[in-house]
Image: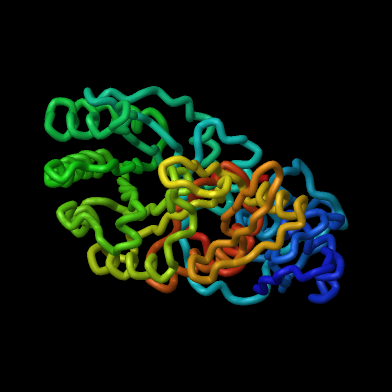
Amino acid sequence: MIIHIVGQGETVDSIAQKYSKPVDRFALENGINISDSLAVGEALVVVYPEIEYTVQPGDTLVSIASAHNTSLMEILRNNPYLSDRKFIYPGEIIVIKYEGEKTSSISTNGYVYPFVNLDILKKTLPFLTMLSIYSHYYDENGDILFVNDSEIIQMAIAYGVAPVMVLAEIADGDQAGRGVTHNILINPVAQDNLINNLILILNRSGYYGVNLISPYVLPEDRPLFVEFIDKLSTRLHLAGYKINLSLTLNVFEVMTNVLYEDLQYDKLGQLADNVILMSYEAGFTLGVSQGIIAFETIDNILNYAVSMVSSDKIFYGFSTVGYFWELPILSGATRGQAIRYNAAIDIAREFNAAIKFDDVTKISYFQYAIDSEYVVRFKDARGIDAFAGLVPRHNIRGVGLWNVMYFFTQMWLVINTQYEIERIVPLRIQD
């Protein structure tokens, strides 16, 4: 895999010619149009097929996969545009395998909301190990709000992806749920009600397990929280379900390498089937910019994590969306707004903004001006390559992707061509 950085005057066609790539395939792999005007500093991915196949009359994707001793999901991962199609046509060229051996396996846990576009989800599912559906909310009595998620669950199961229920506390005014958590932890009756309601939903839904989003836990409640996770994991395991525990690291924790020692990460790691360390980089928080965390600091956090929790249980979670801010960024006043990769690139192209890459944080960025001046920070192929590389570097299990509500072409190309994506439930669909 080569990551090409666009220079002044380069075009999609000239870059394809430079690497002896068919321009239509090069554009397709990068999710761009041949006629697109590129931004200086834009990152494009160059990969080469090792085995290609020309579709013959009567072929199906299943028959092609079988003939080449590969899987239907691998065909869809190598040719994601086929997910948008009902038919394949004689004469089409399909990539069976890309050059190079995949360095290691990786588990991918993507987060979606129930209102995800199903066409986008269908295109994304071949790349996922687990699909975490956000969110079932619980209140202080242990009652769980209804979520209409049956269609998403069944689609995930059909694609051999484990659907996981995200369970989170309902917001409680200005305390952002801290009162809910506290009341659950001090009330055994509410705990039992929550667990009973949870298992009832799991039994009728088809979920593989639960992903509990750990809230901020008050210092005096942390021993109680560990006791609750012990009770919850015991009940879930007896009922045949897995438990993933998402621990959200705030910016202070990550930047200072200080974690809540009294939260007993080692004990939590023993109780959970997987631990997902989510550091959102606070792009949505007042006055804090995405990408302020040095990549070396994240390395240090993972070094600490694998000393406390079995590495084959750990996922490192990162955001697939970028953020933009109006300048100047004022502490406590300026709020970042989320932006998808494609939208960020479109802005850079429209305003002829040169994209730069911060090697310290592995974040790309640029500035532009309309009526005011703005800064945009986001992950492109360079950042995705670095963050996915944390998996083999620390021998952890995989990545948690917040979120997969849109199809991030470059991200999946980088991951798919370098890693074998783990599957934990059987595939049910046929083409």
Residue 36: where, in percent of width, then height? 82, 55
Q: Is residue 374 left or right of residue 198?
A: right
Colour logic: rainbow
Instruction: Residue at 34%, 41% (x, y): give it.
Output: 210
Which quadrant holds the N terminus?
bottom right
Hey, which quadrant is residue 117 in on the image? Answer: top right
Q: Which is more toward the observer, 264 or 425?
A: 264
Hey, which quadrant is residue 27 in on the image? Answer: bottom right
Instruction: Residue at 60%, 54% (x, y): give it.
Output: 73
Marker count (numbered): 0
Residue 195: where, in percent of width, then height? 23, 32
| Residue 410 can be seen, yes or no | yes
Q: Which is more toward the observer, 338 or 16?
A: 338
Q: Is residue 86 left or right of residue 276?
A: right
Hey, which quadrant is residue 304 in on the image? Answer: bottom left
Q: Which is more toward the observer, 365 or 301?
A: 365
With respect to residue 277, does 310 lie above or below?
Answer: below
| Residue 63 can be seen, yes or no | no
Which quadrant holds the C terminus?
top right
Q: Which is more toward the observer, 96 or 10?
A: 10
Q: Is residue 261 left or right of residue 167?
A: left
Q: Is residue 335 left or right of residue 123?
A: left
Instruction: Residue at 18%, 26% (x, y): give it.
Output: 190
Instruction: Residue at 60%, 52% (x, y): give it.
Output: 376
Residue 6: where, in percent of width, then height? 74, 68
Residue 404: where, in percent of width, then height? 55, 46
